[in-house]
Image: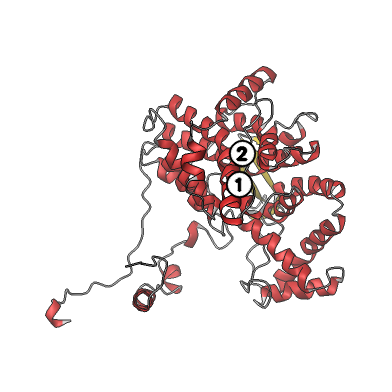
Amino acid sequence: MSINYSEITPYLQQLAAVSDQNNHIEPQMYLQHQVKRGLRDLDGSGVVAGLTEISHIKSKEITPDGKEIPCKGELYYRGVDVHDIVKGFSPDRCNGFEETVYLLLFSKLPNKQELQKFTEQLSIYRSLPPSFVRDIILKAPGKDMMNILSRCVLALYTYDETPDDISTANILRQCLQLISQFPLLAVYSYHSYQHYHNGKSLFIHFPKPELTTAENLLYILRENGEFSPLEAKLLDLALVLHAEHGGGNNSTFTTHVVSSSGTDTYSAIAAALGSLKGPRHGGANIKVVKMFDDMKATIDTTDKNAVRDYLVRLLDKQAFDNAGLIYGMGHAVYSVSDPRCEILKDYAKQLSIEKHMEEEFALYELVAELSPEIIAQKRKMYKGVSPNVDFYSGMVYRMLDLPNELFTPIFAVARIAGWSAHRMEEIQNAGKIMRPAYICVKETQPYIPMEER
């Protein structure tokens, strides 16, 4: 008898209805018990759950009379302003990501010799175990790159001679290997998907030791292996801006929570990947691109009034996916501006000229201009709204000819740097398993014998 394991049967529908009916908590109960849903206050600020030295986000300033007011967003990696980090990159090389990884892991900026040796070490690790691509990636192709990436990470556990050793040196070794291997896992998984599910030709390029992370990603992704210096530079920048964002984002917090149990590196990173896959976290830039695709297909995007009307209809759940959102607008922490967005916007404008996509860039600027005012009119807001990093990163990836399927995996290629730093910090400093409290609001009830039910 053949079983369709994906089928939702009438019995399952019935059980789901029972679950929906019996698992509903009234929203006012969260206020009654002073529970901060999503571990956040009404203004978006997160509940403090730990200490970190890895990165810091500034979105508010304290006035002389002690009041908090929103300010221009700032982001610091190990105390260094990300704007200054980006300005300091070598103009003729795109190894900013490698420099950033070193800073995040070791809390110091590398000198020329240290960066060269560190980059060489990452290059040595930029390979996969023998037959791994054949046995793990090609023999079980999937349609979701993030799930394949998680599976690959867990599979690497079995190739590790000391997977459960949580000494600093061993965790560092594992993290450096994963940082180097993530571009290969993501791109090879995409090629496998394209070949087995879409009938495309299969090609596997081995990375070149002389190329950086960004350069190798473009090289192994493209059949001809070619890319322009600006393309590599912009991808490198995107990796830097996505490498870390405080300990409070969902996937990094997941890394802390899972690492606090003392489990292995592969399990912790796989859990973080599961978090990042969610459309509320890492999948936002795909939604931005698809939203703009729908906009261009349904209205005259050269008409400002038509664009304004489309944005209103988005909020009224009458356009695109009817979710009531303008994707890429707003952030849990930033209100006045997202510093990553500002940096990426300047470089995106340069690439739009090279790619002859100035009109596309102008449309993004128009939406960024109109959205805050429209959202303020349509929504009760506790803080300001501005474009976030996902707003322009989707456009950048599109201009780089990166497939939609790789948008979130490339986010992971960058964020593995921050996850690694936070995992090491948690193991080195915590000493206690994280165990938050929940208030049970279900009244007690007697046990009813089976024959009386």
User: Residue sitting at 68 percent across and 66 percent down?
Assistant: 326
Closest to the observer: 286 or 59?
286
How is colour applied across the structure in the image?
A: secondary structure
Amino acid type of the residue that numbered disc 2 sits on in the rendered structure: Ile
Vertical order, 48 against 173 (above or below) = below
Closer to the N terminus: mark 2 or mark 1? 1
Q: For mark 1, does the 10 Å Cα neighbourhood hold few (<14), some (14 to 19), or many (20 or more) residues?
A: many
| Element assignment for label 1 | helix
Tag 2 near tag 1, CB within 8 Å: yes
The crowding category of the residue bearing disc 2, from other C-alpha atoms within 10 Å (few below 14, some 14 to 19, many at least 20), is some
Residue 361 visible, this angle: yes
Near-viewer residue (142 or 228): 142
In screen coordinates, is 42 left or right of 165? Answer: right
* Residue 58 place in picture, x, y as percent: 64, 46
Image height of 119 relative to 435, above or below: above
Under circle 2, the secondary element is loop
327 displayed left or right of 24: right
Which label number is shown at residue 46?
Answer: none
How far from the left and from the top, in percent, is residue 193? Answer: 57, 51
Q: Which mark is residue 204?
A: 2
Residue lying farthest top?
A: 113
Tell me the CA gap for discs 2 and 1: 8 Å
Q: Nearer the viewer, residue 199 or 238?
A: 199
User: How many badges with numbers are in the image?
Assistant: 2
Residue 24 image point, x, y percent: 39, 74
Report which residue position mark 1 lands on. Answer: 191
- Image vertical order of residue 57 relative to residue 306, above or below: above
Left or right of residue 52, residue 284 in this image: right
